[in-house]
Amino acid sequence: MTTLLHCGDAARGDLWRAVLPDLVPGLTVRHWPDLGDPSDIEYVAAWTLPPGLAAGLPNLRMVASIGAGVDQLELATIPPHVAVVRLIEPDLVRGMVEYAVMATLMLQRDMLGYRDDQQARRWSPRRRVAAADRRVGVMGLGAIGTAVLDGLAPFGFALSGWSRSAKTIDGVATWHGADQITAFARDVDILICALPLTDETRGILAKPLFDVLPAGAGVINVGRGGHLVQDDLLAALATGQIGGAILDVTTPEPLPGDSALWHHPAVVLTPHIASDTVPAAAARAMAEAILAIQRGGVPAGQIDRTIGY
Ligand SMILES: O=C(O)C(=O)CO
């Protein structure tokens, strides 16, 4: 019996149980914690894995993240021969683009400053800076980062991007690797982090990077809370080196009530809502991944276990 174990939202589990067997002939879908015979389970889909689950499934072939990131699966708990796949579907990418464009425009149009003015009943118009005079840099040039750059292009921003390995994107100045991060960052007025969280990128949004950005730069984090060193951000906001931050992700989540980020006038905080996975679309992506494995192929979105994304 070929079985997928779905972990997480029960409504999505029910939908998947109804639709996936039509997309993958012979597939049975079980919903955690109904494991049945663990040796039936070849595929697991989860946002986070129940502790010890992956190691206890002798015939496991693939773990799929229900989302674009995989770090929350705790890759070290998944045996190395098991394929790990990110389930990126178009609606999830669209949500990320919407959020990143909204956040960029908020910083571009000084909405954080006008929010303050409104609270103080201050009528204080400021000169608009044209988008063409603002440099927006995206860190992470995978499916999400490149879609964000596409979404920003019509506004006329000067666009750049930085990634681990070299990428070429029309109309975007691209940089790569640790050696080029300074050259990238010194010309970025609004920095968007869309990186995967790996050992290399953890804590990358920190003082050394903030110090290189032009004074007053804005920071947007749609990656993971672990990318940001919160104390360094607060210090950079205090000196004005960073002018504003829009954060959709924090460490930990939920953000504790006593965090200074909650009430900071130069911070907009949202509870990891930039995007989400649409269950029906994710079922199709899941089916394609299983069919690829069954054909002996590599599913779209399979990560390189050696680099963690
Ligand atoms: O899909 C993911 O990994 C997300 O965090 C969506 O915001």
Image: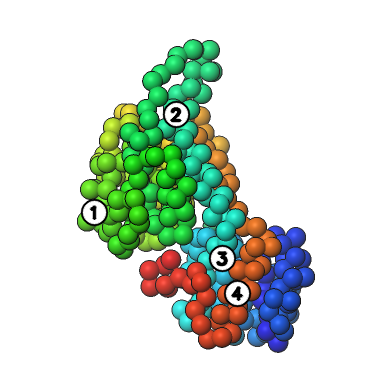
Q: Earlier in the sequence, mark 1 or mark 2?
A: 2
Q: Distance from label 1 to label 3 (Cα)?
A: 30 Å
Quadrant of ligand 1 in image: bottom right
Instruction: Report the side of 21 relative to 181 (left or right).
Output: right
Instruction: Return the mark for residue 288.
Output: 4
| Horizontal and vertical percent position of residue 140 | 39, 55
Instruction: Report the side of 21 relative to 141 (left or right).
Output: right
For disc 2, the marked residue is: 109
The type of colouring in the image is: rainbow
Can residue 243 be seen here? The reply is yes
Q: Residue at x 43, y 54 (%)?
A: 145
| Horizontal and vertical percent position of residue 104 | 45, 38
For disc 3, the marked residue is: 87
Q: Residue at x 47, y 47 (%)?
A: 151
Q: Distance from label 3 to label 2 (Cα)?
A: 34 Å
Q: Ligand 1 near label 2 (Cβ, under 8 Å)?
A: no
Q: Earlier in the sequence, mark 3 or mark 2?
A: 3
Q: Residues within 10 Å of mark 4 (few under 14, many from 20)?
A: some
